[in-house]
Image: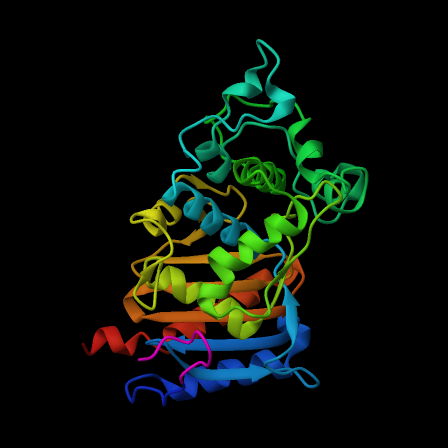
Amino acid sequence: MPWPTEVWPRAELDGRVDRDLLDRTLDHAFTQPESLGTTNAVVVVHRGAIVRERYADGLDAATTHVSWSMAKSMLHAIIGILARDGRIDVAAVADDPAWRAAGDPRGSITIDQLLKMRSGLLFHEDYVDEHDSHVIEMLFGAGRPDAAAYAAALPLEHEPGSVFYYSSGTSNILSAVVARALGARGDAYREFLHRELWDPLGMKSAEPRFDEAGHWIASSFVFATAQDFARFGLLYLRDGVWAGRRILPEGWVDYARTHTGTDEETGRGYGAHWWLIPGSLGIFRCSGYNGQRIIVVPPLDLVVVRLGVSPVELEPELERFNKQVIDAFRPLLEQS
């Protein structure tokens, strides 16, 4: 199957796939917004080819969508590229300027702990109550000019490494780590993202957002088409190799999908800036606010991208949609 650097190959569904279940699930997603929220795009990639692609009225394959927290997983890739080139040591301390004073316990926080959401820093990841939300204040309030500095200024709540807590602040601290490793901000930082990650994959639509300090707001902001988000998922499905070129260092994808913590509310596992779904399929995924998903299912050679607007109260129905799409391909395992 040719790599989709320029154009995605397309294929018919394997005859063993439950076509009826798959198409009913997609029909429901685009016609029942009251139960699932608004679905704007779905791209299903099997064995490296697009087998299903659908868009809401008025949208098409050229429409770009906001990643929200799916950007965090792209940040994982960028740090992997820097680690590959010896420009970042993941085991080293993050060395944030705010933590360099003698005796500051935050100075022991490592890049690895930030990637695993185990920094110990205080952070309230609340998307509703703006009065008790560090993430809203960081992205849209006082922290907006320099998101990394805002997050790094918060105190420790736990000993570094001891507690898992999902925090968008840690991703922006890591983005500043990347900027220091590059010795670049703003346009030079943007150029690196394109040259080293998005351009080799053919992600021509990818566009990050930067704050006034010149840091990529890597917690939340990459705009791209559904097909380009699928390209990123395929990179991880193929162990960080693209068209014969190793983009990510060996073991980096396994690092992303090795369990390091569990969200108490949802029971979902976490690796290193990627979410993990329990079960025999070893599913790992990028997840963003309002139901943005890039789902990677290695045993089925499957990538599923779903983009739209699904409020948190509709999360169970969104999970049911994701499961049904994947279940349509399960007969491939049962009959292999």
State the image quarter where residue 63 is shown.
Answer: bottom right
The residue lying at 67 percent from left, 61 percent from top is: 311
Q: Is residue 39 left or right of residue 193?
A: right
Q: Is residue 232 above or below residue 278?
A: below
Q: Is residue 158 above or below residue 194?
A: above
Q: How many marks?
A: 0
Answer whether residue 165 is visible to the viewer in this image. Answer: yes
Question: Residue 294's spot in the image, x, y percent?
Answer: 49, 64
201 or 122, nearer to the observer: 201
222 or 299, nearer to the observer: 222
Q: Quadrant of the N terminus?
A: bottom left
Question: Residue 244's spot in the image, x, y percent?
Answer: 30, 65
Q: Which residues are magenta?
A: 1-9
* Residue extending furthest toward the top: 103
Q: Is residue 328 left or right of residue 76?
A: left
48 or 20, nearer to the observer: 48
Q: Magenta stretch: dominant SS? A: loop
288 or 5, nearer to the observer: 5
State the image quarter where residue 19 is shown.
Answer: bottom left
Q: What sort of colour scheme is used for the picture?
A: rainbow
The residue lying at 64 percent from left, 48 percent from top is: 216
State the image quarter where residue 174 is shown.
Answer: top right
Question: Residue 95's spot in the image, x, y percent?
Answer: 54, 25
Residue 6, magenta (yes or no)? yes
Q: Is residue 39 left or right of residue 321?
A: right
Q: Quadrant of the C terminus?
A: bottom left
